[in-house]
Amino acid sequence: MAESRNRRWQRATVAEAVDVADRIMRIVLAPEHPRKVRAGEHIDLELELNGRTEMRSYSLVEANDDGSRLAITVFHTPHSRGGSEYMHTLGVGDVLRITEPLQDFPLRVGAPQYVLLAGGIGITAILGMARVLKAVRADYRVIYVGRSRSAMAYLDQVREEHGDRARIHVDDEGTSLDAASVVAELAPGTELYMCGPIRLMDAVRRAWIERDLEISDLRFETFGSSGWFDPEEFEVEIPRLGVNTTVGRDESLLEALERAGVEMMFDCRKGECGLCQVTVQEIRGEVDHRDVFFSEAQKSVRPAAKLCSCVSRVATEQTDDAAAASGTISSSSPVETTHPVPRLRIDVS
Amino acid sequence: MSITTEQNATQAPAPGVTADVSESIAEHTTPEQITTAKIFPYPLNAWWVAAWDHEVTSKALLSRTVADKSLALYRTEAGAPVALADACWHRLAPLSQGKLVGNDQVQCPYHGLRFNPAGRCTFMPAQDTVNPSARVPSYPVVERDRYVWVWLGDPELADPETIPDMHQMSSEEWAGDGETIAAECNYQLILDNLMDLTHEEFVHSSSIGQDELSESDFEVTHDGNTVTVSRWMYNLDPPPFWLKNMRDKFPGFSGKVDRWQIIHYSYPGTICIDVGVAKAGTGAPEGDRSQGVNGYVMNTITPETKRTSHYFWAFMRNYRLESQLITTQLRNGVHGVFGEDETMLKAQQTAIEANPDHEFYSLNIDAGGMWVRRILEKALRAEGREQA
Ligand code: FES
Ligand code: FES
Ligand SMILES: [Fe+2]
């Protein structure tokens, strides 16, 4: 039950690679050291990108009983950092490095009612849970939201396996989901598990807090927590230490500071513990908070005061909002025609 | 979950069947047969009794170890029992030394993190949010027949339907009470003890033992999860314990009796023994027990560690239900009898430890206990935990 915090790496061979929906591919991996898989688990996977080794996390959609076959699903995002492109070139027999299954999104058996909410590729984290809840005869509903049917993987499977318990919402058919109404319908004590785009999850979270439901009954996968903005390169400066460096699109602020020789404190490296927080002195751009440590109120402080360096970033200020975000360096600095690189001046503990 | 692929047809070999891996393991371990293991491993996909109903309250936390897992047990205000792992998520301080606070929550004694019955953290000091990953395991738990049963294995398999039948404990047709023995031995030694009652003649000679026990024949039957050992003895003098019981129901009784012991084992650790005597020749073996007295010894054994056990027992009877005196006398009587077993079991465990190179050998009388061991062995293999 107590899951290990240590990543154990192993080799895995691609046993199957097939397209299952528009730009969505299912890859079955045969790991070197199989073990039984639990709902909600994911693997981290290493891939080679432009000569660099990078890591990505993928939910385990399915596995056989002894875990010797692990299925993941890869969505080909046009704006991605290249990872999904690489994954889509994989073929049977290719060998990868993956971790043993990791659990950051455990399903608890025993709640009176469940809602499983999947947005797009988030269905990959939700499918296994739905199967478990069906098997233990729990009272559950599956809500699956997507842009268009062709882009929704495992749609038939969801309908076949969960029948009346499944509800499908498709944006381009005009049946978009109203997150607030989902929350409004819940009986107190219901556990809601969600995985999907940040905007969807934020909307649910807000409605949840507004209804004053027990916050621990709202469950979500945090590794995927993309930010509100695409990752951009930005500059960072620590005047006290004379440090000046650039944070690349592919790395975190924490990594960049460590690379620059700053001794940083951290533990979780996924925006949960708050140990890696830095103090903002000046900012050009907007903080893209991607942690769950700071509260909504703390995150909405202007000018930004603190951020978790392991996950949060700085993005170019959105022009429409620029005026609204008064008090920031950028809005009071002279108007420039080209976007200046976002910039952060901080201090660390 | 399932995946169908062509490669999937190549299944992992069954334990002990040709495979490089299992061969190399076999070299370093004892033979395939673990039925006669001295320190018997315990299955986790099983309902074990953690406590008596009255021990688990909404006033205070109870610390108890089951199958080498320390648990913090308590009850919600609504009365539902809760079993959390007894180690805080933060720095592993024992939650059982903390306190119960509003809304059925446990507050860690060290830095005050709070956990709800689901094991999720609901409060962290000095910050505005709660880390959503912070939790302690919360185990499936069911209260039934005066006991609190806990499931430490795969929660998806925890089916309350498989809790052993101990209905006499909560039936209006039965009365009685019991105790817990802190037994200093492996749990299976106690199951062995209860599955073979010929030891009564030697261990319990002053109360329930009599020569006819080891002289009479017995019958053993079994299925997937149960074993039954039946023994009938005819036309004998009742030993002191049974003479007293007969006189409670039939004042002034004297004479010969027919005596029975029907031992029912249910996976993983429950043994209910249907015991009694009836006036000789009045039809008890054929089913008419009206001229006799009938008790049920309700035993359920829980491994605490590999070498210590919680031995929960009660003695229930179906006559003179109104007499609290008889309830107390019977509980005290069985307390004395089981004290003799406790001493023997501890001595046996000590001798086992002192003689690590000696093995167990078996007798005819061990048939019941050996079938119990076989059932447990299968469960252990299914979990891949047959190596102690
Ligand atoms: S290291 Fe834990 S929040 Fe950044
Ligand atoms: S150890 Fe429990 S709060 Fe710190
Ligand atoms: Fe005994």
Image (cartoon, coloured by chain):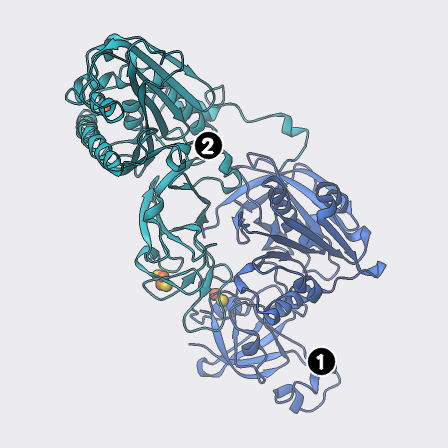
Across and down, in percent, residue A104 comes to 53, 54
Q: Nearer the viewer, residue B157 or B286?
A: B286
Q: Work out whether A204 lies above or below A90.
A: below
Q: Chain of mark 2?
A: B
Q: Residue at 68% across / 64% down in the picture?
A: A200
| Residue B195 seen anywhere in this rendered image of the structure | no
**Chain A: drawing colour:** blue
Judged from the image, the quadrant occupied by ligand 3 is: top left
| Residue A81 seen anywhere in this rendered image of the structure | yes
Please give left or right for residue B254 compared with residue B173 in the image.
Answer: left
- Labels 1 and 2 share a subunit: no
Secondary structure, mark 1, is loop
| Residue type at tag 1 | His
Q: Chain of mark 1?
A: A
**Chain B: drawing colour:** cyan
| Residue type at tag 2 | Glu
Disc 2 CB within 8 Å of nearest ligand 3 atom: no
Please give left or right for residue B228 compared with residue A111 in the image.
Answer: left
- Residue occupied by mark 2: B383
- Residue occupied by mark 1: A339
Q: Nearer the viewer, residue A127 or B264?
A: B264
User: How many residues crowd around disc 2 within 10 Å: few (fewer than 14), some, or many (20 or more)?
Assistant: some
